[in-house]
Amino acid sequence: MSDLPTLLNSFESLGDNCEFGFVQRKFGTEPAGLLRWAIASPAALVAGLQDEFAHLYAYDKLVSNAVDMLGDLTYGISFHTNMRSSRVDGQFRFNVAEPERHQIYLEELKKINYLKNKLLEKLKNNGTIFVYKRNAGVSSAQAFEIRDQLLNYNPQNVLLVVGTEGDTPGKVWEVAPNLLRATIDRFAPYNQADDVSYDLWLEICQKTHAILQAKSAAALS
């Protein structure tokens, strides 16, 4: 596929942070995704997938955990927010009073619900390549647990797990049905998520697409 924006748009980021979101931006696409700019551990992701993120972004379950981020205590997912905070005595505290903060929240909730419904539609209807990475690594058990949650929505969904394990950066291989792994040379540090190994990410996406296209062609022959 020579059209890089179309290629990168065929992948949906599930986290664990915004690194893959920067990859998509680098190659010309800006898909709106619930988890594209969020922080989600494997356990948080599985918890959300299990109940279709039914209780996501409840006002009384949101806490400030950075200057411009909120933690959702129900799932353990963190989102960027306009409810700004400052660090006071080692803790983050909101800068604005509750009435103003709640008004900001209502506006953000509309966006969160839109993105949630968009993700659920993809999960259920499209047969999508979902991408997950984590700087500390994703265990085999975690990878299978996430894949199984995706398959509960649609048996055509595919999970690509990218890690730094192995000595062949750019390698992509099938671990099991609907589950691929890939090796990259490094991840961006969490405090500079746009310091990305862009060329290798692109190579991984191209190889993943080629593997899946070949499997599809073989199934039809």
Image (cartoon, grey):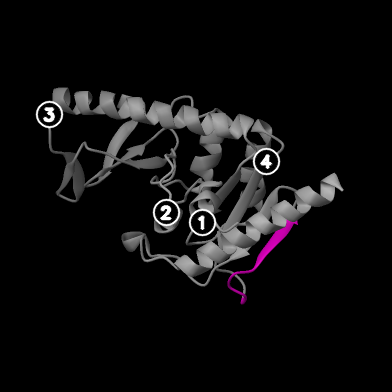
Residue 32 left/right relative to 164: left
Pointer 4 with pointer 2, Cβ within 8 A:
no
Amino acid at the residue labelled 4: Asp
Residue 40 left/right relative to 214: left
At x 64%, y 62%, the residue is 207
- Please state the extent of the stretch shown in magenta in the rendering: 167-175
Amino acid at the residue labelled 2: Gly
At x 63%, y 38%, the residue is 150
Amino acid at the residue labelled 3: Ala
Secondary structure beneath dot 3 equals: loop
User: Residue 217: image x %, image y %?
Assistant: 79, 50
Pointer 1 with pointer 2, Cβ within 8 A:
yes
Q: Which residue is mark 1?
A: 4
- Marks 2 and 3 sit apart, C-alpha to C-alpha, by 39 Å
User: Residue 8: image x %, image y %?
Assistant: 51, 52
Secondary structure beneath dot 1 equals: helix
**In the image, which disc is placed on residue 28?**
2
* In the rendered image, the vertical position of residue 46 relative to residue 109, given as above or below: below
Based on the picture, tell me whether residue 169 belongs to the magenta stretch: yes
- Marks 4 and 3 sit apart, C-alpha to C-alpha, by 42 Å
**In the image, which disc is placed on residue 148?**
4
Q: Earlier in the sequence, mark 2 or mark 3?
A: 2
Residue 4 left/right relative to 25: right
Q: Quadrant of residue 121?
A: top right
**In the image, which disc is placed on residue 97?**
3
At x 60%, y 60%, the residue is 206
Based on the picture, tell me whether residue 43 belongs to the magenta stretch: no
Mark 4 Cα shell of 10 Å, populated few (<14), some (14-19), many (≥20):
some
- Marks 3 and 1 sit apart, C-alpha to C-alpha, by 45 Å
Q: Earlier in the sequence, mark 4 or mark 3?
A: 3
- Marks 1 and 2 sit apart, C-alpha to C-alpha, by 7 Å
At x 33%, y 26%, the residue is 109
